[in-house]
Amino acid sequence: MVALLVHLKLTLLRNSLRRSVWRTVGLVIAMLYALGIVVGVLVGLVALRATSTALTGDVTVVAFSLLTLGWLAMSLLVFGMDETVDPSRFALLPVRARELLPGLFVAGLIGSPGLATVLVALGFVITWARDVALAAAAAVAAPLGVATCFLAARFATSALASVLSSRRFRDFAFAVLALVGAGLGIGGNLIGSSLGAEGGQPLQALGRVAAALGWTPFGWAWSLPADVARGRWGDAGLRLVLALALVAVLWWAWGHFLGLRLVQPLESGGSAARIKQGTWVARLYPATPAGAVAERTLRYWRRDPRYLAGVAGLLIAPVVVVVTQLSNPEGSAAVVAFAPVILAPLIGISVAQDVSYDGTAVWLHISTGISGAADRTGRVLSTLTIFTPLLLVLLVLSVGLSGQWRLLVPVTALTVGLATIGLGVGCFVGSLWQWPAPPPGANPFQRGNSGGLPALLSFSVTTGLTLVLGLPTVALVVASYWESWLGYLALVVGALSGLLVLRIGIVAGGRVLDRTWPEVMLAVSEKSA
C-alpha cells in the first residue's frame, strides 16, 4: 500500500506538471528556493560541530522546536496541507484507515516542505555525531521529530476540516487563526527584544528559551541529544517516552479523523438558505452591470471563508507592527503611525485574485455578456466596501495611539495613494493571470490547486508595480519631514495618481478580459490530473 500511494502521488504530480508549463516552472523555483534554505541551514549545523555541546544543544532545541511549530502554524495559516492524494477519494474503495496511514505519511513527505525537513533532520544527526551516545540519541530524535512535524500538522488540519461543517464556525475558526498569527508575530518580536535586553548575556537567555521549549511537545524529541550531552539521562528518558507517546497519539488521532473522511467525505454542498430580495446589499450599488457584479462579489466577502482568511492575513502585519512597537520601550511612534501603509498596497491583491476565486462561476459573466470593464469596476466597488472602513479604523487608531497627529496628512496620503494605485494595478494584473483555486465548499485547509507560478507572479507584480507607481507620493511624504506643506501636496498627488491608475487598470484590464474570456474560463476550471 505504501508503494502504491507513493507511486500514485508521483503520477499525479507528473501528470499535473505535463499539463501546465507554469506548474513545472513553479515547482522548479520552489525546489531551488527550498534547496537554498536547506543548504544554508546544513552549513550552519555543520559549523555547530566546532562549538560546545551546551551551545549546540540550546541552538538545536530552539531552532527545531520552532521548525515543528512552524509546520503546524503554516499548515493552518498559510499553505494548508497538500492533499494531492486526497483521503476522501478512497471513500468508495474497500480500504480501512489503518491501511492508508503509512502510505499517506510517506506520500505526504514528498514535496518541498517534507524533503527539506528530512534533509535538515539529517543535518541534525550530523551535528550531534560526536560520539556513539550522541549519535544514537540524534538518530532516535530525528525521525521522531520529523514524524511530530508532519503528524501534528496533518492531525490539526484533518480535525479542523472535519468539524468545519457550518459557515459560522469556519468564520470563527479563521478569526482565531488570524489572532494566532498575530500572536506568533508579536511573540517572536518580544522574544527578540528580551534576548537583546540581556545586555551581554544572550547565551544565558538562549539557554532559558531552550529549556522552556524543550519541555513543550514541540521540543521533546529534539532535546534528546542535548540531555545526553549534559548527562541528564533521567530527563532524556522522560522526554523519549513523551515524544513516543505524542507520535502514537497523533498517529491514532489522524487515523480517527481519516476514518471519518472515508465514511463521511467532505462535500461541497450548496446552502439551502435563499437570498432575500431587497436586502441592504442590493441597495448599496447602482442597478448597472457593475453594480450587479459588486453585489455578487460582496456576498462572497461576507460568506466565503477564503475571503475572510485573506482579510485576516492582510491585517496581521499592521497589527503586529502596532502592538510590538507600543510594547517596546524603544519603539518608534512614527512606525506605529505609518502602520496602515503596510496594508494599503496589498489591497490590490484581492482584486487580482478575485476571478480565480470565482472558479466556474465566472461563466455568469461570460454568458450574460458583461463587459470586462464592468467586471473590473464591480470588483473594485465590493473591495472598497470591505477595506475602506478597515483602513479608516486602522488609520485613526495608529495615529491616535502613537500621538503623532502631525503625521495624519502624510499617512493618509500614502494610504489613499497606494490603496487606489493597488486597486488599479490589481484590475489589470487580475486580467492577465488566473489559476484554479480550491472551491468554497472544499476543505478550507486543503492546498490542492494553489496556483503555483501564476499566483506568485500575480502577487509579486501587483505589489511591486504598486510601490513603483507610488514613488512620487512616497518622495513627497519623505520631503514633508522638512517642509510640512508638502504633505498636503502628497495627499493631492496620491489621490490623483491613484484615480488615474485605477481608471487605466479598469479600462485596460477590461479590454484584456473581453478578448480572453474563454481562456479565463479554462484557467480557473482546470483540474489537477
Image: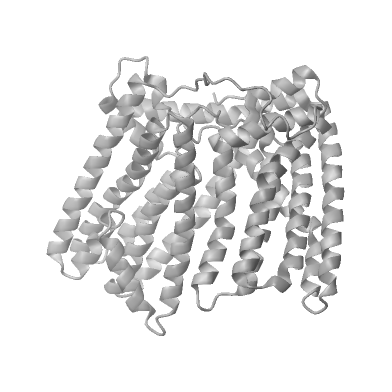
Q: Is residue 194 above or below residue 462?
A: below
Q: Is residue 460 visible?
A: no
Q: The N terminus lies in which quarter of the figure?
A: top left
* Image-based side of 356 in relation to 519, left or right: left
Residue at horizontal 80 percent and vertical 27 percent from the top: 287
* Image-based side of 422 in relation to 23, left or right: right
Can you tell which quarter of the image residue 432 is in?
top right
Q: Is residue 166 above or below residue 92?
A: below
Residue at horizontal 65 percent and vertical 61 percent from the top: 396
Residue at horizontal 14 percent and vertical 58 percent from the top: 237
Can you tell which quarter of the image residue 403 is in?
bottom right
112 or 93: nearer the eye? 93
Q: The C terminus lies in which quarter of the figure?
A: top right
Residue at horizontal 78 percent and vertical 51 percent from the top: 421
Please identify the residue farthest to the bottom as the structure is shown: 200
Q: Where is residue 56 shown, x and y percent of the image?
A: 32, 69
Q: How many marks?
A: 0
Q: Where is residue 118 shown, x and y percent of the image?
A: 37, 49
Q: Where is residue 184 shown, x and y percent of the image?
A: 45, 58
Q: Is residue 60 visible?
A: yes
Q: Give the colour scheme of this rendering.
A: one colour
Q: Where is residue 169 shown, x and y percent of the image?
A: 44, 35
* Image-based side of 234 in relation to 32, left or right: left
